[in-house]
Amino acid sequence: MGKLGDNLRRYRMQCGYTPRRLAELCEMERDTVKAIEAGDIVPDPETVETLAEAVRVRPERIYGLERLSDKGGIHTRLDKDKKTSTLYVEWGKDTELTDCVMYLSDNGIALTFKETEEE
């Protein structure tokens, strides 16, 4: 199991859901939930958001970024258009970028960096 899959399984079990029940809540196949938990597939950001909502946690917790999120350093948002879903990760001054990059790349999540202006 990958870390993302371990996290999903832990939060699913905390809610008392079976893989079948979580799949029903998310309108997906039970085998898809099991494959995500086993680390056989990496879900897209939209799917992670749907799963996180069903198990009542923020997507950062599914991704395993809660340590950084709890420090106020990581904030995620999901932008959807007709062709893609993009997970944006913003980090604060006290957050180690390498922690984010290593976790995401280790879990097969494609990385694209774009510099943005501070608000």
Image (cartoon, helix red, strand yellow):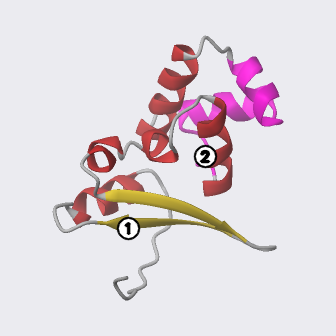
| Distance between the alpha carbons at the discs numbered 2 and 1 | 17 Å
Relative side of 3 to 28, left or right: left
Q: Three-letter amino acid code at disc 1?
A: Glu
**At which x and y percent is residue 17?**
65, 15
Q: Secondary structure at mark 1?
A: strand
Up the image or down, 87 lies above or below 23; here it is: below
Q: Which residue is rendered at x = 28% and y = 50% of the image?
A: 68
Q: Three-letter amino acid code at disc 2?
A: Val
**At which x and y percent is residue 64?**
39, 42
Instruction: Give the residue number, with chain letter if any, for mark 2.
Output: 48
Label annotation for residue 42: none
Q: Quadrant of the C terminus?
A: bottom left
Q: Sequence order check: which comes first, mark 2 or mark 1?
A: 2
Label annotation for residue 90: 1
Q: Report the span colored magenta.
A: 19-43
Up the image or down, 118 lies above or below 39; here it is: below
